[in-house]
Amino acid sequence: MTPTITAGRASPLGATFDGEGVNFAVFSANASRVTLCLFSADGRTEEHRIDLPERDGDIWHGHVAGLGPGQLYGYRVHGPYDPAEGHRFNPNKLLIDPYAKGLTGQPVWHDALFGFDPARGPDSFDGRDSAPHAPRSVVVDPAFSWGEDRPPATPVEETVIYEAHVRGLTRLHPGVALPGTFLGLASDPVLEHLTRLGVTAIELLPVHAFLDDAFLVRKGLRNYWGYQTLGFFAPEPRYLHPAALSARAGGIHQFQQMVARFHAAGIEVILDVVYNHSGEGNEFGPTLAFRGLDNASYYRLAPDRRHYVNDTGTGNTMNLDHPMVLRMVMDSLRYWAEVGRVDGFRFDLCTTLGRTDEGFDPGAAFFDAIRQDPVLATRKLIAEPWDIGPGGYQLGAFPHPFLEWNDRFRDVVRSFWRGDRDMVRRLSDRITGSARQFDHSGRPATSSVNFVTAHDGFTLMDVVSYSRKHNEANGEDNRDGHDDNRSDNMGVEGPTDDPAIRAARARRRRNMMATLLLSQGTPMLLAGDELGHSQKGNNNAYAQDNETSWIDWRDIDAEFLDFTRAMIAFRKAHPILRQKRFLHSRERALDGREDLFWWREDGQPMTEADWVDPARRILCAEMRTAAGTPPYAVLETALFLVFNAGDACTVALPAPTGGMVWCRAVDSTRAGQRPPEPVAGPSVDCPGDAVLAFVLERCG
């Protein structure tokens, strides 16, 4: 029996269950006909094809009575197949709904998934049915009882971010009952670890449904990181535990449960989102969704219309200049913010989202739209401030309230501790919030997201264990991944039993972690660094869904974990380290003292000759509450920080004010930290290759 279809509504887009049936609405400006395909519960049989009866502007829609959550569906879209004009309609291809709230899984790679005949080239037309090989969209009812959920709303200046992978963090954890899933990520053992560590937000690598690329599948690999999005509204099926599903519509509920548990633990959830491109690739890629729905609208096309603009390096670029594509992105963000209650977003290749025909524009439509949105403007927004397009590196150019990944912080910190020349001035810029990039337009010092490691690159253990990348397992003859890693194996490439090298590596890791957590800005740690995780020198583990990337909880560095906990706790205890105002050595109205002093180790102020001395390896900073800080803010007297990548020396302490004394609070030469110790004299012995931090406190 053919289901009954009526006009339905043009809004909202997607498949919406209303208690009596499902309303279907989908955008296509250039289609001539849109056919809804309904599948059996097991997804194997295409039971009905129904043309959507109404078109309001460019939105095709209809309401089918009697359908409900769990219904599997897709679209076939008719229109011109004319690559020279940018059109690639092919009704033989079953298409994912761009607004689908659930997907059944991965496509099964077959030539029928392509709109063209691979044997005849990308301008040819392929008449084979792709349905036997394509994923199904799933009707979902996202209603969820949040109970007493209260998002932590952690101020940015108090935020410590932990970048993690749903599967990688949990797959080998012996105490997690559902490893590799959203529910496993929010299990008690993981939450206990994160709360004891002291982080305030977990930033998850992509959780939108994504594609395992054909070339990876042929090599027996998978897309591990997830930067090949198929559906901007659907959770990745591999992170859902089938045994815990309530029908096939329950996937989002598992995500919601995860968020609620993180919130109850006081931890925010930030999603790494990929709106700059899709997983369909270039003109040689499959027709899975956007290409078949309206290629000329969804993608930025080259002047010849056959090819795609490739500012992302993935083969295509989403066309956010089109209002309906921009609407899709904004609707997706609101869905995860409102239905998923996430606390923020990190935008992959965010420069692409702000690129117009004239180049990058901080006032581009995407930035204007997100900043005026009453829901999204309250979330934490983080930009990856680059892509591979012209003028793609835009560190510091994004509008408030965006924070930005600061790769210059990473490079300078690694270079300084490796012993590179001429790094002292560069380090001074980075530990004070990278003001050259961010101190403009009212932006706070917290705009700089400081990191030494991230998913893309070496882990912290590998930074001190390998002098070159080892990506052979990726199957690309070690050609992939960065070559400039600013790393140092300290005498042996890879693991070693040499106690001196192991000790030196441990100290350098402590130095880099201490530098990160003693710097102005918003710190971000890579999951597993605190445990000593190594990827065996692979700095591009995007396809390593295995023990290379999975964190081994059975073999952890307990001493370094304790050190990292202590450093996060120290940061939280000292407001001077997490100020919104920049330190510029300005006189304070409070006491007439400057808020920042740069000292030589002999107690004299740094001179220009000292700053330009390429052989200098030590930097000493006296920091105070920034000039202009209002009197109602939490105040602190002073910190004195020493970063010594050179030899052991004597360091003079700044003269304390009356009734005060400097207390040694951080010493990176120690695997374990001790309570603050008052310093008796005017100077201290500073070991080589060390970070020291002193707190000015009142005697007694």
Image (cartoon, grey):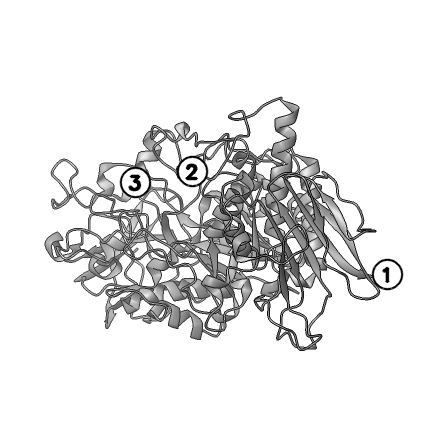
The foreground one among 93 and 362 is 362
Asked if 52 appears above or below 247 in the picture, the reply is: below
Residue 129: image tag:
none
| Quadrant in the picture for residue 66 | bottom left
One can see residue 345 in this view:
yes
Indicate which disc, 3 or 1, sits on the residue closer to the N terminus: 3
Classify 10 Å Cα crowding around label 2: few (below 14), some (14-19), many (20 and above). many
- Eye-nearest disc, 1 or 2: 1
- Eye-nearest disc, 3 or 2: 2
The foreground one among 641 and 411 is 641
Element type at mark 3: helix
Query: Could you tell whether 563 is left or right of 543 in the image?
Result: right
Residue denoted by label 1: 699
Q: Position of residue 349 (x, y in %)?
A: 38, 54
Q: Residue at x 13, y 52 (%)?
A: 83
Residue 133: image tag:
3
Asked if 622 appears above or below 123 in the picture, the reply is: below
